[in-house]
Amino acid sequence: MSQLPEGWVRKKLGEVIMSGPQNGLYKSQTFYGSGNRIVRIDNFYDGILNPQESFRRVQIEPEELALYKLNQGDILVNRVNSMTHIGKCANIKGLTEETVFESNIMRFALDSQIAHTQYVVHFLTSPSGLKEIRKNAKQAVNQASINQQDVKGVEIFLPPLPVQHQIVAKIEELFSELDAGVQELKTALARLKTYRQAVLHHYLNNPDWERVKLGDVVKRVFDGPFGSNLKTSDYIPQPGYQVIRLENVGRMEFIGEKETFISEDKFTSLEKHEIFDGDIVFSSFVGENVRATLIPQLKYKAINKADCFCIRTDENQVNRKFLVYSLSTERVHKTVTLDVHGATRPRINTSQLKNLEMPFPGLTTQTQIVSEIEARLSEADAMEATIRQELVRAENLRQSILKQAFEGKLITTSVDKLKLEELEAIPELFPVYEGRNAGSSGDQLSLF
């Protein structure tokens, strides 16, 4: 900012630090599991600590506790991470037990007669603050770092202390309103997930349909090459012949962003595992839901990996989309969950998949059902896209609030009437601010 508001001053962060910066404690993994709580780089973001119950524990000596114990009002800064996360910070408050911090973090405390802790934390998470703290970051492969001198050299804009308190209060007020809107949107997303499952249940749970084993209505069910037949060292960086992996199999969705390739010679040796457009790929690993997807038109010839089962259908008996939807129902999830084996990554095998009993109507009915389901799901998809756009706008608004705060535009000494909807260039951010309940969006989707 070229010109500061009246009464504001530029200072280096080092000028208002009372103690620190200090790098955190390094302990090898053998010390983790019990002892004191320790804050790690994945325990905070956007200036806020995650719930303390999520912190790991580490065994430490009394002298280490004395040196690295966190105090109320400490500020944590992430000093080693990817460039997109370097410099993230948090204000320490409300700790319920003695807690230390890890070596990829540094901490410092401010002179409270000069700077308000939460004001500085908000500044460091603002666009200008992040730019300032990252400008001297040293980049290496997949990570970046900042040191204590980099942090002390960060330039901050300080109004008088009473104004800092006012700015913090206004930011917290606006963030509270913003967070309420975001929560409404997230609730709507959760309702859409429930709605999609309800659609499948409604259209695919007819007790009058004949129950058949999957293996009796498809041409073939097969897995990919196991063990040494396909190793990581067989993968090549350039496009060749594609390998369909778990990362490509979503829930009723093919995820094409990640591509893995093998050479022509390797493909030839594994050609019996070739899959084609229109095949169905089913994840052998069973988690919160079943993952099955239709293979779209691919640029390259492809095989499936061992943990991705291919289901090849007979078009005279099975509508492929109908089968994908049927495999994605909660009923199928519950059935395969009872059959899974494996403690850490439960999975089923091809025999269990072939023996899976499912209700199947005639082909004409299958096609009609698919049309009905797609109409309902397209409504949900459109609504989800809108909600996700609003969530992006919410994050942009959060940054806009901080930007205006540290340009001296968020409050004035004479009047403090700014409301969330009055921020420039952010009209009608959320339906909830117009008196409509964004969380009710999912309720507006009816099956009938």
Image (spheres, rainbow, N blue to C red):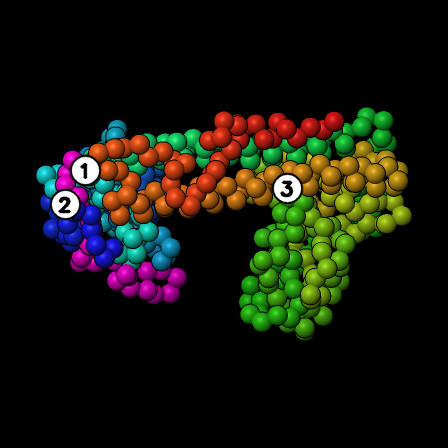
Crowding near the residue tagged with mark 1, few <14, some 14–19, many ≥20 C-alpha atoms within 10 Å: some
Bin the neighbour count of mark 3 within 10 Å (Cα to Cα): few under 14, some 14-19, many 20 and up.
Answer: some
Q: Position of residue 406 (x, y in %)?
A: 26, 46
- Asked where in the image residue 226 lies, by quadrant, the reply is bottom right
Disc 3 target residue: 381
How far is mark 2 from mark 1, CA to CA? 10 Å
The region drawn magenta spans 135-162
- Pair 1/3: label in front: 1
Q: Name the mark nearer the viewer: 3 or 2.
A: 2
The disc at residue 7 is 2
Q: What is the quadrant of the C terminus in the image?
A: top right
What is the spatial separation of the Cα atoms under label 1 and label 3, in whole angstroms? 45 Å
Q: State if disc 3 and disc 1 touch (CB < 8 Å).
A: no
Tell me whether circle 2 and circle 1 mark residues in contact (CB < 8 Å).
Answer: yes
| Residue 202 sits in quarter | top right
Tell me the kind of residue under disc 2: Gly
Which element type, helix, strand or loop, lies under badge 2? loop
- Numbered badge on residue 163: 1
Q: Nearer the viewer, residue 4 or 156?
A: 4
x, y percentage for residue 343? 55, 39
Name the N-terminal-most of marks 2 and 1: 2
Task: Indicate left or right for 85 with 122 as reference.
Answer: right
SS of the residue at dot 1? helix
Q: Quadrant of the N terminus?
A: bottom left
**Residue at 62% of width from left, 63% of height from top?**
230
Q: Is residue 257 magenta?
A: no
